[in-house]
Amino acid sequence: MSEVKKIKLTLVRSISGRLKSHQQCASGLGIRRMNRMVEVIDTPENRGMINKISYLLKVEEA
C-alpha cells in the first residue's frame, strides 16, 4: 500500500484579530496554539486552507 503524505504545520503568528474565516481555517487544520506543530494529511482541501493562511504558518514536508 502507498504511504499517506503528511505536512507539518507550525503556527508562527497569532490568529487573534484575524478574519473569522482565517481563524476557522486554523481550527479546521487542528492548530490551537502558537509554536505548536501539527501533522495533517496532504489533501487538496487541506492545501487550500494552508494557502489561505500561509502568512501565519511555517510549512514543512513530513
Image (cartoon, rainbow, N blue to C red):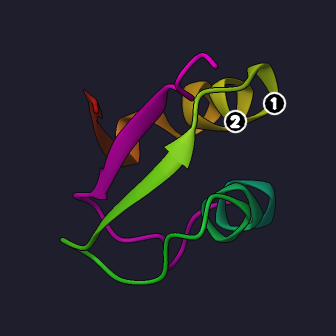
**Amino acid residing under circle 1:** Glu
Q: Nearer the viewer, residue 18 or 29?
A: 29
Residue type (three-letter) at the residue carrying disc 2:
Asn
Q: Which residue is mark 2?
A: 46
Q: Is residue 17 magenta?
A: yes
Q: Nearer the viewer, residue 27 or 18?
A: 27
Residue located 64% across and 19% down the image: 1
User: Is 16 drawn above or below residue 52 in the view shown?
Assistant: below
Picture residue at 28% right of the left edge, 33% below the top? 62
From the image, tell me which residue sits under label 1. Answer: 45
Q: Is residue 41 left or right of residue 19?
A: left
Q: Residues within 10 Å of mark 1 (few under 14, many from 20)?
A: few
Horizontal and vertical percent position of residue 16: 49, 79
Which residue is found at the position 68% from the left and 54% from the top? Answer: 22
Q: Residue at x 42, y 53 (%)?
A: 39
What secondary structure is the magenta-colored segment mainly?
loop
**Closest to the observer: 9 or 51?**
9
Is residue 50 positioned above or below 11 on the image?
A: above
The answer to whether residue 60 is magenta is no
Q: Which region is colored magenta? A: 1-19
